[in-house]
Image (spheres, rainbow, N blue to C red):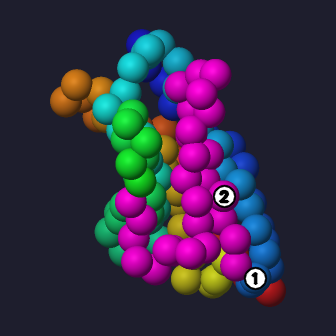
């Protein structure tokens, strides 16, 4: 059974930083892993994505502030979030795409507020 476990969310002031992590178990390969977020009253959007080949893409609103990276020792990704803004407040979900199957974590809440 594939499981994705997120960690690292919390409350941070505007301009601050957080690092999210997502570790997968029950699977040995992925095509891509990424982070999505859903703000109150809004739909889920892709934040950052990393392919097994190392290609990355980001939603325009986080470019230059967020960085997605892979843990080469295991099936895991991290999202370094800097210069956080109140608009970044959302539940962040980890996603893993493997040979056409999509897996999701339960989400971790990020709140940016003074």
Q: Is any part of residue 36 visible from this angle?
A: no
* Residue located 38% across and 60% down the image: 57
What is the number of the mark on residue 39? none
Q: Foreground: 49 or 107?
A: 49
Q: Secondary structure at mark 2?
A: strand
54 with respect to 108 (left or right): left
* Residue located 38% across and 36% down the image: 53
Q: Is residue 104 above or below residue 99?
A: below
Q: Foreground: 45 or 63?
A: 63
Count how many numbered circles sit on residues in the image.
2
Magenta residues (range): 57-83
- The answer to if 75 sits in the magenta stretch is yes
Binning the other alpha carbons within 10 Å of mark 1 as few (below 14), some (14 to 19) or many (20 upward) gives: some
Q: Quadrant of residue 83?
A: bottom right
- The answer to if 59 sits in the magenta stretch is yes
**Residue highlighted by disc 2:** 80
How far is disc 1 from disc 2 in space, using C-alphas?
Answer: 13 Å
11 with respect to 3 (left or right): right
**Residue highlighted by disc 1:** 15
């Amino acid at each position: 059974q594939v499981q994705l476990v997120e960690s690292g969310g919390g409350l941070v002031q505007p301009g601050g930083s957080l690092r999210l992590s997502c570790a997968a178990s029950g699977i040995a390969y992925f095509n891509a892993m990424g982070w999505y977020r859903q703000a109150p009253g809004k739909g889920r959007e892709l934040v950052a994505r990393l392919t097994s080949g190392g290609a990355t893409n980001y939603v325009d609103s986080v470019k230059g502030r967020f960085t997605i990276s892979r843990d080469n020792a295991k099936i895991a990704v991290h999202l370094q979030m800097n210069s956080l803004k109140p608009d970044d407040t959302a539940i962040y979900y980890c996603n893993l795409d493997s040979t056409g199957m999509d897996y999701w974590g339960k989400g971790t809440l990020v709140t940016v507020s003074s």
